[in-house]
Amino acid sequence: MAEETIFTKIINGTIPSKIIYHDELVSAFADINPKAEHHILIVTNKPIPSVANVTKDDEPALGRLFTVARKIAEDLNVNESGYRLIVNVGKDGGQEVPHIHMHLLAGGKLGGLGFPDKK
């Protein structure tokens, strides 16, 4: 079994966090170091280390990441104005926690392809 990550601890409630969404497949919570007005992490509840480790069995959870992102964007009223979804893969791709997660960034015009400058 993989080492328990900070995300697993948030999902299990052993580390407090501002939970935005939770169901049987995914959870979403506020990033503790936001890079935009709205910076939410959407994670699989199953601790999959990276996109490099996904299997066909993971498709329902991976699809749910996107439908939950859409719901959160609607709740934030940014579904029409726009938002960014980022999935980093591996150390060189900028992945810091070995647990699949998607960053939802929104709030104002997002510049460049990386994280926007926080105002």
Image (cartoon, rainbow, N blue to C red):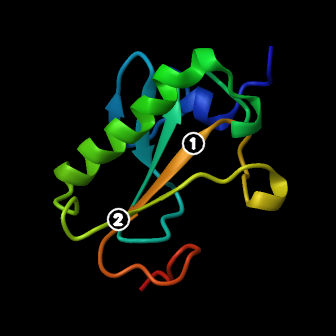
Q: Quadrant of the C terminus?
A: bottom left
In the rendered view, tell whether residue 113 sits above or below residue 67: below
29 left or right of 94?
left
Q: Position of residue 60 (x, y in %)?
A: 47, 21
Marks 2 & 1, CB-CB < 8 Å contact: no
Choose between 106 and 7: the one closer to the eye. 106
Secondary element at image label 2: loop
Q: Residues within 10 Å of mark 1 (few under 14, many from 20)?
A: many
Choose between 113 and 14: the one closer to the eye. 113
Q: Position of residue 105 (x, y in %)?
A: 41, 63
Mark-to-mark CA distance, 2 and 1 = 16 Å
Quarter where residue 115 is shown: bottom right
- Compare marks 2 and 1 and give the one earlier in the sequence: 2
Residue bearing the label numbered 2 = 83
**Residue at x-position 75% and y-position 29%:** 53
Secondary element at image label 1: strand
- What amino acid type should be assigned to the residue bearing mark 1? His
- What amino acid type should be assigned to the residue bearing mark 2? Tyr
Q: Position of residue 44 (x, y in %)?
A: 53, 29
84 left or right of 100?
left
Choose between 12 and 102: the one closer to the eye. 102
Residue bearing the label numbered 1 = 101
**Residue at x-position 41% and y-position 79%:** 110
In the rendered view, tell whether residue 113 sits above or below residue 69: below
Does the image show residue 13? no
**Residue at x-position 41% and y-position 39%:** 28
Q: Quadrant of the N terminus?
A: top right
Q: Position of residue 20 (x, y in %)?
A: 32, 40
Does the image show residue 87? yes
In the rendered view, tell whether residue 45 sits above or below residue 71: above
Quarter where residue 66 is shown: top left
